Image (spheres, helix red, strand yellow):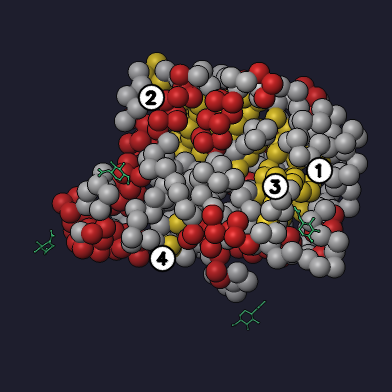
């Protein structure tokens, strides 16, 4: 575990020398050679001409079982040697369930398909899956960005040992942001392993099962997705703090009603349209709710704001010439790429009920922790995050107030001792898709450790 990383919308950032060709700080198993020619991407189909370098390929993480994770690393647009490194992970965590996080996005979704090509990377897969267009709000403006498909089974990442796929869970190789930050924090006591981790940034992250559920149902009711009667039944019969929430039939049925209503719209973005049309990847569609009645798994709905974007990505990443350019295959035997792998989600073994203890530990460790929330996401709604964070009982250092971007209210912000919470007004789960300019400005504030502007 050498890489700073980011999940369902989480970021770890380090202001140490940039990871990349010149500094060669890839995981021990794979050092980019000086000059990085081996993984340098030179012929990416449909790519506009650019002045920065990017690298893609596999990192072998387990020699014996033959496990390899796919990464894509973009140097910052300017002065990469002076910019921090940010690891981005989509995938959220499963909180009985999410994660959105990565989350959107439970474990099993690709940070290349979402983060890199829809949200914050320099290239966005355009409508037909044939061209890439430049993203003027790419986060590479501010940082070197590393996207990792994790765990094996996601995107291009794989294992040659099939049983590896049966053992996936938070405690296996797939670590999401809070857990990964904790590991780095713990291992940093050994100076020889030291990683200069400065902070984590989490977007609409799943945090604590009970509070996340309460937030999900209250949000659905307060946003006119379900009736007063359904909400009343939930209030009276659901005990989200217990281990047997779903054994109460009345509760189960009422929550199913919430999920059924959400099948009609995009739970990740309440006020935008769904993709109507021929789906090439129905098994990945965002309207698919996976709900484990035997556990407290929050329904996992795969997909982001525009499910059609998912299809373009699928078309693009399954092209032989694209796979060759990204050092995934020789261009003949291609790998089947999907934006989400539902089996991973369904088979996820272990996941923590709450990452709040980790938050506490990281806060004590002095890490910068910023949590943001797009306020039109129904999947990990702003209420879930507020309920979760309030259980931390952190002292407020700066009270609730609007923050601004280009003289408009970007959202609201509250600062606690050790943690900053912000909303994005009118943004769905994958915030940067909806509010790219605001997101980049916010990200820049995060890296500098300065609050976003709170005056017009
Ligand atoms: C997996 O097996 C293939 C075929 O034997 C091999 O080329 C590849 O290097 C293996 N992957 C890893 C990560 O060991
Ligand atoms: C739920 O189960 C976990 C482990 O299975 C246990 O640690 C916890 O105390 C239980 N919580 C309740 C409220 O029973
Ligand atoms: C479920 O609801 C029905 C009708 O509203 C009620 O009669 C029954 O007592 C409820 N069951 C439980 C376990 O609360
Ligand atoms: C989409 O579906 C329509 C009706 O089922 C069909 O006529 C059309 O050929 C399909 N288009 C594509 C691109 O698959």
How far apart marks 3 and 4 lie (CA) works out to 42 Å
Secondary element at tag 1: strand
Q: Which residue is mark 3?
A: 62
Image check: 50 left or right of 305?
Answer: right
Residue shown at the point (48%, 60%) measured from the top left: 346
Q: CA distance from mark 3 to mark 1?
A: 21 Å
Residue drawn 82% across the image and 53% down it = 327
Question: Which label's residue is closer to the chain start, 2 or 4?
Answer: 4
Pointers 2 and 4 in contact (C-beta within 8 Å): no
CA gap, disc 2 and disc 4: 34 Å
Provide the residue designation for mark 1.
55
Q: Residue at x 63, y 28 (%)?
A: 13
Nearest to viewer (mark 3 / mark 4): 3
The nearer-to-camera label among 2 and 1 is 1
Q: Is mark 3 within 8 Å of ligand 1?
A: yes
- Mark count: 4
Looking at marks 3 and 4 on the same chain, the residue that comes earlier in the sequence is marked by 3
Distance from label 1 to label 4 (Cα)?
A: 40 Å
Q: Which mark is residue 400?
A: 2
Residue 238 in the image: state x and y as whole percent.
22, 52
Q: Is residue 398 left or right of residue 310?
A: left
Q: Nearer the viewer, residue 63 or 1?
A: 63
């Amino acid at each position: 575990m050498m890489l700073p990383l980011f999940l369902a919308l989480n970021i770890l950032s380090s202001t140490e020398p940039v990871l990349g060709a010149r500094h060669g700080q890839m995981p021990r198993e794979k050092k980019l050679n000086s000059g990085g020619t081996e993984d340098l991407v030179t012929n990416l189909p449909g790519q506009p001409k650019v002045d920065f370098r990017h690298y893609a390929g596999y990192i072998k993480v387990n020699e014996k079982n033959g496990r390899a994770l796919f990464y894509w690393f973009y140097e910052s647009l300017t002065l990469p040697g002076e910019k921090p490194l940010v690891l981005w992970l989509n995938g959220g965590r499963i909180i009985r369930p999410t994660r959105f996080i990565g989350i959107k996005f439970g474990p099993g979704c690709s940070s290349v398909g979402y983060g890199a090509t829809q949200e914050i990377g320099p290239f966005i897969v355009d409508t037909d899956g044939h061209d890439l267009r430049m993203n003027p709000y790419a986060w590479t403006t501010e940082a070197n960005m590393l996207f990792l498909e994790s765990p094996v089974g996601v995107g291009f990442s794989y294992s040659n040992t099939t049983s590896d796929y049966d053992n996936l869970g938070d405690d296996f190789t797939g670590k999401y942001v809070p857990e990964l930050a904790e590991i780095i924090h713990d291992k940093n006591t050994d100076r020889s392993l030291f990683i200069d981790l400065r902070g984590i940034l989490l977007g609409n992250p799943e945090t604590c099962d009970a509070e996340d559920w309460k937030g999900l149902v209250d949000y659905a009711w307060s946003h006119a997705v379900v009736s007063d009667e359904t909400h009343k039944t939930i209030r009276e019969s659901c005990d989200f703090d217990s281990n047997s929430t779903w054994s109460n039939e009345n509760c189960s049925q009422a929550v199913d009603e919430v999920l059924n209503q959400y099948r009609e719209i995009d739970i990740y973005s309440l006020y935008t349209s769904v993709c109507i049309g021929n789906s090439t990847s129905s098994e990945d569609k965002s309207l698919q709710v996976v709900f484990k009645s035997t556990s407290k798994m929050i329904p996992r709905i795969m997909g982001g704001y525009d499910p059609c974007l998912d299809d373009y990505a699928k078309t693009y990443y399954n092209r032989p010439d694209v796979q060759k350019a990204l050092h995934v295959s020789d261009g003949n035997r291609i790998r089947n790429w999907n934006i989400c792998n539902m089996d991973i989600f369904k088979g996820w073994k272990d996941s923590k009920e709450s990452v709040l203890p980790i938050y506490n530990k990281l806060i004590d460790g002095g890490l910068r922790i910023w949590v943001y929330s797009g306020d039109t996401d129904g999947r990990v709604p702003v209420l879930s995050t507020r309920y979760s964070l309030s259980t931390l009982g952190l002292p407020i250092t700066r009270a609730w107030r609007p923050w601004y971007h280009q003289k408009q209210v970007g959202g609201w912000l509250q600062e606690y001792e050790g943690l900053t919470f912000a909303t994005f007004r009118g943004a769905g789960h994958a915030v940067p898709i909806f509010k790219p300019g605001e997101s980049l400005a916010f990200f820049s504030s995060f890296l500098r450790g300065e609050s976003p502007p709170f005056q017009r």
